[in-house]
């Protein structure tokens, strides 16, 4: 109830939350060139949604990111990581041997492999932290 | 080096204050400040990836989780009489650890054994085999890919554990505890 | 001044002892978890400070590098990245357990919990 009266917080967060999510995407894909990578990006992504949930309420957050999406994303990230490893085996290399992903240029295969597993890691970390927030915040009102 | 000693001193003061506070909301806020000080210390020690992660995780998510849990469990700690036993244990353990560090290499020494086994291979191999600038990402994702797979599995398991603990039905006095329902129905009602 | 060469290890040991004291001497379960967090950060500082090389730079290869730069050791950084994220996962599970204990027993102070358990509730 009281959060609806805090106009300054609501207006400021409407300006910040898209920037936070954009920054999380930047950190995810620039992990190769500077500090960053999957873990940091996942945490920042979850922090943006947690901020939204704190200011606009858990029901609004559940309309934006429903529980079923979060649940599936938690498992999907780990599956992507394992899937890259298995597809390396299917293309003739060993488990998690990214050079086998592109037979013409192993360096390109390494780039591809690193990109996809960082995506998987970022997805799992973001979804898990968001799921933990849902669980803790939803407990107080049951 | 003196900036690092100063930051270490601030860290110790913050840690001692966290221990002695009785109001746990204030302790949670101070632990966020503690994480930010640690992130600055990591940056001074050239560990930029670790500093980034510590700042995001410690000062962001960790503080939110602690405050959320404190809102559900009550946030004042009862004042306790100071007992002698823990002090003695802590002093003995600290003395043994300091005795153990007496023959470690000096801080920043390039001839320390840690820099001569696998690390030069990783540093040389990153530009030769991968062509990406961030050595830490290359080691994390490719040279030590199995560790990262295990770590992602640990995060997944922790998420499943929290879901199993907190998303089942709350037990009421007059009904039997329902098994946690894996969150597929329970989490969707507002 | 040999002590000044290993000051970082002593600072880390002091921080670890503050964390250990919080875990064993305080009764409130959330305070114990915060102390555990302090202990974890001290261990991470230990490893990262072992990896620092005087005159080195962060382990990111700049444009136009020719192989003559001195980098700080990247291996402790990789291991500690894993450790930090696992630490927050453990904290989350610990806090979930504390919330359930509070619902089951009505208190989260350890001495009251032991008294309730001993009296067979």
Image: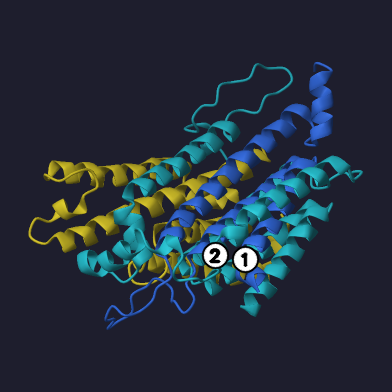
Left or right of A21, for residue C42: right
Residue B120 visible, this angle = yes
Q: Nearer the viewer, residue B36 or B127?
A: B127
Residue B185 % position (x, y): 50, 31
Q: Earlier in the sequence, mark 1 or mark 2?
A: 1
Asked if badge 1 and badge 2 are on a common chain, one would say yes
Q: Going 44% across and 56% down the picture, which residue do you hit? A: A39
Residue A56 visible, this angle = no
Q: Going 41% across and 64% down the picture, which residue do you hit? A: B115
Of the chain colours in the picture, the one used for chain C is blue
Q: Nearer the viewer, residue B70 or C3?
A: C3
1 and 2 marks in contact (CB < 8 Å): yes
Count neighbours of disc 2 (C-alpha within 10 A) and say few if under 14, some if 14 to 19, many if 20 or more: many
Q: Nearer the viewer, residue A57 or B101?
A: B101
Q: For mark 2, what is the residue?
A: C49
Left or right of B8, for residue B109: left
Which numbered disc covers residue B92? Answer: none
Q: For mark 1, what is the residue?
A: C8
Count neighbours of disc 1 (C-alpha within 10 A) and say few if under 14, some if 14 to 19, many if 20 or more: many
Mark 1 to mark 2: distance in Å? 7 Å
Using the image, determine if residue A135 lies above or below residue B102: above
Farthest right residue in view: B81
**Residue at mark 1: chain:** C
Task: State which quadrant residue A25 falls in.
Answer: bottom left
Left or right of A25, for residue C112: right
Which secondary structure lies at badge 1? helix
**Residue at mark 2: chain:** C
- Chain letter matching colour cyan: B
Of the chain colours in the picture, the one used for chain A is yellow
Left or right of B31, for residue A56: left
Q: How is the structure coloured here?
A: by chain
């Amino acid at each position: 109830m009281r959060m609806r009266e805090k106009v300054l917080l609501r207006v400021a967060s409407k300006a910040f939350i898209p920037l936070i999510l954009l920054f999380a995407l930047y950190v995810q894909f620039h992990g190769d060139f500077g500090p960053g990578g999957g873990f940091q990006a996942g945490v920042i992504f979850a922090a943006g949604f947690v901020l939204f949930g704190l200011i606009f309420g858990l029901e609004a957050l559940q309309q934006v990111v429903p529980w079923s999406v979060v649940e599936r994303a938690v498992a999907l990230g780990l599956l992507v990581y394992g899937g890259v490893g298995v597809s390396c085996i299917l293309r003739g290399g060993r488990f998690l041997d990214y050079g086998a992903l592109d037979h013409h240029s192993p360096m390109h295969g390494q780039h591809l492999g690193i990109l996809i597993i960082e995506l998987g890691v970022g997805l799992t970390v973001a979804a898990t932290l968001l799921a933990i927030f849902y669980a803790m915040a939803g407990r107080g009102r049951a | 080096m003196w900036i690092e000693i100063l930051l270490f001193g601030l860290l110790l003061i913050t840690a001692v204050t966290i221990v002695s506070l009785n109001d746990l909301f204030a302790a949670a806020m101070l632990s966020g400040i503690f994480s930010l000080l640690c992130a600055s210390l990591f940056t001074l020690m050239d560990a930029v990836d670790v500093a980034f992660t510590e700042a995001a995780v410690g000062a962001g998510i960790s503080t939110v989780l602690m405050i959320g849990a404190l809102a559900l469990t009550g946030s004042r700690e009862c004042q306790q009489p100071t007992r002698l036993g823990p002090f003695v244990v802590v002093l003995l353990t600290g003395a043994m650890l300091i005795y153990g560090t007496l023959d470690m290499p000096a801080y920043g020494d390039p001839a320390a054994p840690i820099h001569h086994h696998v690390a030069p291979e990783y540093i040389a191999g990153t530009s030769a085999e991968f062509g990406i600038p961030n050595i830490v990402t290359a080691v994390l994702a490719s040279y030590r890919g199995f560790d990262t797979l295990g770590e992602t599995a640990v995060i997944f398991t922790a998420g499943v554990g929290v879901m199993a603990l907190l998303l089942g039905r709350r037990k009421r006095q007059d009904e039997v505890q329902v098994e946690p329902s894996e969150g597929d129905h329970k989490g969707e009602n507002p | 001044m040999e002590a000044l060469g290993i000051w970082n290890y002593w600072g880390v040991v002091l921080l670890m002892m503050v964390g250990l004291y919080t875990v064993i001497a305080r009764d409130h379960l959330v305070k114990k978890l915060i102390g555990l967090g302090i202990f974890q950060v001290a261990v991470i500082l230990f490893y990262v400070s072992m990896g620092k090389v005087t005159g080195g730079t962060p382990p990111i290869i700049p444009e136009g590098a020719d192989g003559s730069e001195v980098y700080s050791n990247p291996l402790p950084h990789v291991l500690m990245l894993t450790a930090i994220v696992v630490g927050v996962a453990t904290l989350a599970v610990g806090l979930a357990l504390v919330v359930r204990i509070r619902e089951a027993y009505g208190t989260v102070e350890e001495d009251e919990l032991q008294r309730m358990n001993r009296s067979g509730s």
